[in-house]
Amino acid sequence: MSEAVQRVQSDSPWEEMIGFARAVAAGDRVLVSGTMPFTGRVLQGEGDPYEQALAAFRNALHALKEFGIGAESVIRTRMYLTHPRDVDAVSRAHKELFDAVRPAATLVVVSGFVDSRVLVEVELEAFRSKSEEPRK
């Protein structure tokens, strides 16, 4: 028997344009799509990689709340940066949010994002126990 797949949308204009969900839950896994540091169409922390990383992670964590889980359930993070010089700032933001959890983490430098002002984009993967899954 297949499990129900749940999807959550956010206010990102790219979700509609590209055709994706902010987060998808299937069974015990919740995947959060690439998330940038925007509130609506307003970039948070322009020019500041630390503030952008915090904003992007908070946006991604907000998507997890829709499934009744939080940072404690995160098992993997991915951080994409446009400049190697920002590794320390983004790492500091990650440590603040996930130090107690210690998820598997990947940090890579990319050539850019759809908005050239963005310095950081993040993804999350989380695990939810059977008790956290929606009842059928």
Image: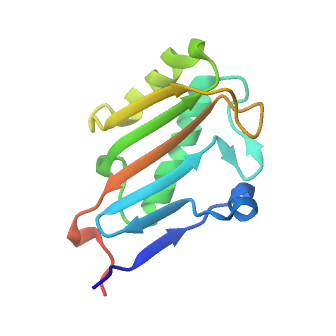
Task: Name above or below for residue 55 compared with residue 40.
Answer: above
Image location of residue 122, percent across then percent down? 53, 40
Coloration of the structure image: rainbow
Q: Is 8 left, or right, of 97 in this rendering?
A: right
- Pick the quarter of the image with the N terminus: bottom left
Name which residue lies at 73% across and 29% down. 46
Of the pair 125 and 132, the residue shown nearer to us:
125
Counting labels gives: 0
Task: Name above or below for residue 53 compared with residue 129.
Answer: above
Of the pair 115 and 10, the residue shown nearer to us:
115
Q: Quadrant of residue 31?
A: bottom left
Residue situated furthest top in the rendering: 85
Q: Is 28 left, or right, of 117 in this rendering?
A: left
Image location of residue 57, percent across then percent down? 51, 41
Name which residue lies at 51% across and 18% down. 87
Image location of residue 82, percent across then percent down? 64, 24
Q: Is 127 left, or right, of 93 in this rendering?
A: left
- Pick the quarter of the image with the C terminus: bottom left
Residue situated furthest left in the rendering: 130
Of the pair 29 and 43, the residue shown nearer to us:
29
Q: Is 110 left, or right, of 42 in this rendering?
A: left
Task: Name above or below for residue 123 compared with residue 118.
Answer: below
Image location of residue 123, percent across then percent down? 49, 44
Name which residue lies at 41% across and 66% down. 25
